Image (spheres, rainbow, N blue to C red):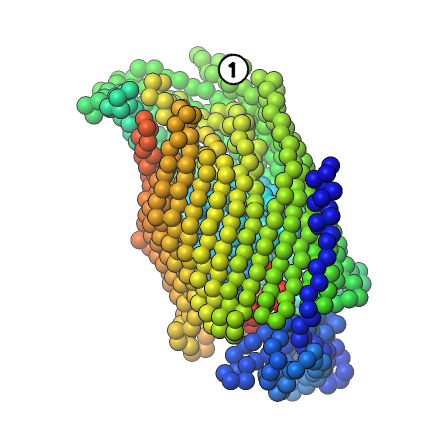
Amino acid sequence: MKKLIVLISILFCSVTVAQTISLEGLVSSSKNEILPYVNVILLRVKDSSVYKGSISDENGHYKIDNIYSGSYMLKVSSLGFQTKQLPIEIIGDTVQNVSLSERLNNLDEVVVISKKPTLDRKIDRLIFNVENTIVSENNTWDIIRNTPGVIIDQNNIMIKNSTNITVYMNDTKVQIPANEIKSYLESLSGTMVKAIEVITTPPARYDAEGGAILLIRTKQNLSEGYKGSINYNYTQARLGKHAIGTSQFFKLNKVDLNLNYTFSPQRWNQKTFNRVNYLEEDNSLNSRWNANWNRSSRKKDHNFRFQTNYQVTTKNSISFTVDGFISPDWEGENESTTNILNSSLILDSLFVTNNTIDRDKRNFSYNLDYKINFKKDGERLNINAHFTDYKQLEDQLVDTDYFLPSKEFIRDNTFLIDNYQKIDIYSSQIDYELPINSSILEIGTKVSFIDSDNDLKYFNRVDGTDNLDNSRTNNFLYKESNYAFYSSYGAAWKKWDFKLGLRGEYTDLQGESKTTSEINENDYFKIFPTVYMQFEANENNVISLKYAKRISRPRYRVLNPFRYYLNDNSYYVGNPELKPTIIHEFSLLYTINDKYNFDISYSYEKDPIYEFSIQDNILKTLEYTNLNTEKDVAYSLDFNTYTNITSFWNIYFQSTVQYQDIVFKVPFAQSINQSNSSWVFYSYLGNYLTLSKDKTLTGDLTFFYLSPYLNGADKRAERIRLSLGFKKELFDNKMILTLNFNDILNSDNVITTTQYQNQDIFSEVDDESQYVRIGLRYNFGNTKLKDKILKKDKLREQQRID
């Protein structure tokens, strides 16, 4: 209780800072009508470059804070109006109202298209803007795969050295199991994505759970009337895949409706080679097991997103969003042949396994948001309620036949698994923002409850009869409650910006195995501070410092102690003894000319969770399980820049050098510490090209390189990806054609080696990363209404840290 009182006292403490110079005013038409959503930009006189900027709100008011005294050009622009540019002298706080004249030759339709992906670097995040680019014609998973700084590691999202990544959709956490994220994002059309934000040190308003945050921003409909599109793409990898979808937008007066739907009938294939050297006590070879896997699946995924917004008053609005993911009749077939070689590497025996899976799953998420904008500019309150309903029903049949080297049949073994999983997630959050002069105070609270039920039944098939095996059957229940409070304060004076945040979370969890009557309980209260500071020495040199503490809790799937079998001798098993991971992240950023960014960072993870492959040299089994390691320490130096080479060629370049050190206890000998350390190099180069004079043909060429790196006890080989894409707009942007070649060199596969103590495992996964995709999108609807969607110039928002 004392800790809670101290926390609440800290949350609501106040800080005062000196007031800074600001520019504000109203934007109206020549008919004295207010003009919302107008670009207002301050330009430097010496080179007409952008200094700062803003956008007028729904009442036509704009405000730009933290301005140096001096002479500037004020540029004000809006679709359908003549751009106005006027000189302005700023000494103290200044009020400048602006009136715009309508264009005499208004077009029937004004469509703003950004031809190339752009990148915005803020103090706590990298924003990859992809709306209306080649990249947006892919599905959302492929957009993330091509986001600078993001690495896909065996279908897991990795940023820097961490796989503890949390995915958000418009500031709402995507509440589905981590192993289902890929399928979910593959079914989301990229045409609905506005930007991907990579937040390496999340502010206090976000859950302390996880490491970095991957935030998906979707488009918003600001134009009145009805518009829509239909899209189709065909992907040829080893197997062919289709996706067809539609987007519908309607806005009239106070109501707007958005609907996105995608149907994805797909076939998928993965080839894997595993080699395990089972060893004697002196580490000499006892036998070698070589397994070749051919995994195939067929699925017909349905994904939809429905959002409606009602403007209750000019200040208040309410919105309701439903995200649905349905995957009925998912069929998977895993065929493997395992050759068992003796110590002389001569074939001793072999077995063939056919593992078939039938799965039905669905995930529905419901969000209700109520937003209140108070009379004071920038003062707002947001109330959110969320519910996730996830269900999965899976039947698995594993049939194994054993043979002598002569292919003479020895015996067989067959078992079945029925698995039912249900997850309910409830949460509610309140966020309040209060501007104080040139500073801002944020406070909020959140409660969330997770209820999971996993019921697994294991049957042995003997002479055609299925017999329940109680020793392997398990019903696992998991409950988690989380209560959070947070406060943050950001301000700016003269050349300094800062933002301080503090979040407190109380967690209570319980895992219960009904079969074994084993109960694991844990509860704890932890505080998570965040600090952001920025010093602008002059217009061309900015230094930033940031720190964040995070937590990564083991999820219910990895806590469940049931065994999921791949074949007779290899299986995955959960670990109910897992502890949460505490993460500390420090970073020092230096920016030159608002273009070249150098980032020195240090991260420390205590008790990080990694998946281990553990061979039993006596029983000849291979177990996959999650374990806490001692620590994971990483030192990184990053450099990135986004710049124009010519008028038709933009590039984004990012390079990272990192030293990583992982210490873990040997799973089968807890008294022994093992250390893995390595230097890692990462590089990403994105080329964005305009290939025609009318700017209707664009292209991109991206290159990705990752040197060998560590993943717990595993060492991964280097990876390379070269991709090429083209986009052509036809019939005044009514029709869009795209052509993409991904992983042209077929060198983005994952090769893993595990060698320490008496462990010797090798794995190579050949996924369908190499493919060709052809896409077609057709836009339709009422095109006679003037679009109010404004193209935002690339502005550095120094006055506020998101």
Please report the residue visible at 55 percent of the width from the left and 24 percent of the height from the top: 456
* Closer to the camera in the image, 521 or 726: 521
Secondary structure, mark 1, is loop
* Closer to the camera in the image, 347 or 238: 347
How far across and how far down the image is residue 700, in percent?
Answer: 40, 64
How far across and how far down the image is residue 387, in percent?
Answer: 68, 42
Compared to residue 577, the image places residue 437 above or below, namely: below
Residue extending farthest to the top is 463
* Closer to the camera in the image, 454 or 50: 50
Please report the residue visible at 32 percent of the width from the left and 44 percent of the height from the top: 717
- The answer to whether any part of residue 130 appears in the image is no
Quadrant holding the C terminus: bottom right
Please report the residue visible at 61 percent of the width from the left and 17 percent of the height from the top: 517
Compared to residue 769, the image places residue 403 above or below, namely: above
Compared to residue 12, the image places residue 90 above or below, namely: below
Pointer 1: residues within 10 angstroms few (<14), some, or many (20+)?
few
Residue at numbered disc 1: 471
Please report the residue visible at 50 percent of the width from the left and 39 percent of the height from the top: 606
How far across and how far down the image is residue 532, in percent?
Answer: 58, 58
Compared to residue 479, the image places residue 372 above or below, namely: below
Residue 515, by quadrant, is top right
Residue type pointed to by label 1 = Ser
Quadrant holding the N terminus: top right
